[in-house]
Image (spheres, rainbow, N blue to C red):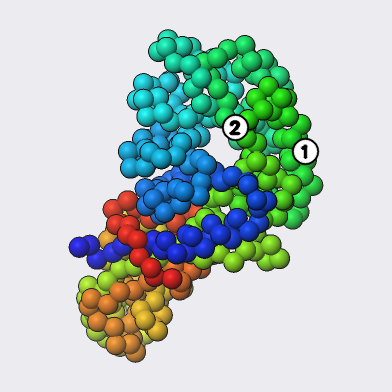
């Protein structure tokens, strides 16, 4: 119905999962990151495709977890940033919180005890040097002692996060993180033999096999991208393609302008096509006059004029495009990396910028 959509390829998703598994030892489990609406791809759609391949699904906040549980209750869902104040709805949905310090652990323990709940599954996060979130090294023994003396909270996994595994210049730091994580998590494994250790993100998966432990946490690689050096790059395929249908084509004369503030003036007679996506859909206003283009069949049509709220204008001079034709804003061509480079950012940000008002559909496009 709408003139724009984000096509999600189940084939590409399956291919990327296979590429990830090729890098792992047999039996290594998968914890799949579906936070930020599966990096903009639609968490419910992605979960419906990959669910059988995962041990855990993970999101950033409780509302994401509740939405995912409502559509897919087959797998446990972990919440990285659970509510500061424990909420009954969170536990009624059996969402599993990450525990990252002693005060939070006590708070959750007391709340669950007051509700008569025992052996509630949680996941322990350690800080091994990123200093963003997680239990500080000096608190490790104290928290383990606390867990050992109670039966309300039951740890299912213990993990940390690599800060710079994609940067060869930081490899010594990464290896130090791996060693520290192993040292800190071993005492937990003694008390809880079934506890799963996990550390590797996308870069860890493909560059540091010693970081794999019991489970790995692919994020951006699941969706077809990475920030790895060329010698470690896996053969991933983009999962999402943002498309829209041309709504109007018009001719303008030399010297006439297009869009707000007249930032583009035609050097000669031009054919201009209107594409109904704009900054309300996640196409940043900064994309104006940055050399970016959209593709319609064999044609690359440059974006001209200012990106507005609901529209971009492209130069279709010399083409036979017409209203109703689909254009690709990003996907196969141009790839998301082209947009990220032009806007001086990373593919993650381009993907997660796509607004929820853009419908997501499963489509074999790649």
Observer-nearest residue: 222 or 55?
55
Above or below: residue 237 compared with residue 205: below
**Residue drawn at x 37%, y 42% as measured from the top left:** 72
Residue 188 in the image: x percent, y percent? 68, 25
Categorize mark 2 by other alpha carbons within 10 Å: few (<14), some (14-19), many (20+). Answer: many
Confirm whether residue 194 shows in the render. Answer: yes
Q: Quadrant of the C terminus?
A: bottom left
Residue 101 in the image: x percent, y percent? 59, 23
Residue 181 in the image: x percent, y percent? 72, 35
Of the numbered discs 1 and 2, the one sitting upstream in the chain is 2
Q: Which residue is mark 2?
A: 157
Cα separation, mark 1 vs mark 2, equals 18 Å
Observer-nearest residue: 216 or 260?
216
**Residue drawn at x 65%, y 25% as measured from the top left:** 192
Confirm whether residue 308 shows in the render. Answer: no
Labels 1 and 2 touching (C-beta < 8 A): no
Q: Residue furthest left?
A: 1
Please identify the quarter of the rendering in which residue 314 is found: bottom left
Q: Quadrant of the N terminus?
A: bottom left
Q: Residue furthest front?
A: 26
> Tag 2, which secondary structure?
strand
Q: Which residue is mark 1?
A: 179
Above or below: residue 268 compared with residue 232: below
**Residue drawn at x 62%, y 35% as measured from the top left:** 196
Q: What label does residue 165 carry, if any?
A: none
**Residue drawn at x 39%, y 74% as measured from the top left:** 294
The mark closer to the camera, 1 or 2, is 2
Residue 138 in the image: x percent, y percent? 72, 22
Above or below: residue 361 compared with residue 146: below
Please identify the quarter of the rendering in which residue 330 is found: bottom left
> Tag 1, which secondary structure?
helix
Categorize mark 1 by other alpha carbons within 10 Å: few (<14), some (14-19), many (20+). Answer: some
């Amino acid at each position: 119905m709408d003139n724009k959509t984000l096509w999600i390829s189940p084939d590409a998703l399956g291919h990327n999962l296979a590429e990830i598994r090729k890098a792992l030892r047999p039996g290594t489990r998968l914890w799949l990151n579906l936070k930020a609406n599966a990096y903009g791809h639609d968490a419910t759609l992605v979960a419906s495709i990959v669910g059988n391949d995962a041990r855990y699904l993970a999101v950033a906040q409780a509302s994401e977890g509740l939405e995912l549980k409502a559509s897919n209750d087959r797998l446990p869902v972990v919440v990285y940033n659970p509510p500061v104040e424990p909420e009954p709805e969170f536990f009624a949905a059996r969402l599993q919180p990450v525990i990252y310090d002693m005060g939070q652990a006590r708070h959750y323990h007391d709340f669950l005890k007051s509700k008569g709940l025992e052996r509630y599954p949680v996941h322990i996060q350690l800080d091994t040097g990123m200093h963003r979130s997680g239990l500080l090294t000096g608190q490790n023994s104290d928290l383990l002692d606390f867990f050992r003396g109670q039966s309300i909270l039951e740890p299912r996994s213990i993990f940390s996060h690599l800060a710079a595994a994609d940067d060869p210049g930081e490899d010594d730091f990464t290896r130090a993180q791996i060693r520290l994580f192993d040292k800190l998590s071993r005492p937990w494994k003694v008390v809880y033999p079934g506890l799963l250790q996990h550390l590797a993100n996308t870069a860890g998966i493909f560059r540091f096999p010693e970081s794999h432990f019991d489970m790995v946490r692919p994020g951006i690689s699941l969706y077809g991208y990475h920030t790895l050096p060329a010698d470690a790059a896996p053969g991933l395929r983009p999962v999402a393609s943002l498309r829209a249908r041309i709504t109007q084509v018009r001719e303008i004369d030399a010297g006439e302008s297009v869009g707000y503030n007249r930032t583009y003036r035609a050097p000669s007679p031009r054919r201009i096509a209107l594409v109904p996506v704009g900054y309300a859909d996640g196409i940043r206003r900064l994309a104006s006059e940055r050399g970016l283009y959209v593709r319609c069949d064999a044609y690359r049509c440059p974006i001209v004029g200012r990106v507005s709220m609901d529209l971009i204008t492209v130069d279709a001079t010399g083409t036979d495009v017409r209203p109703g034709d689909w254009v690709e804003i990003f996907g196969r061509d141009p790839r998301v990396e082209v947009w990220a480079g032009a806007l001086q950012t990373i593919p993650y940000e381009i993907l997660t910028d796509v607004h929820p008002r853009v419908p997501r559909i499963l489509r074999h496009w790649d």
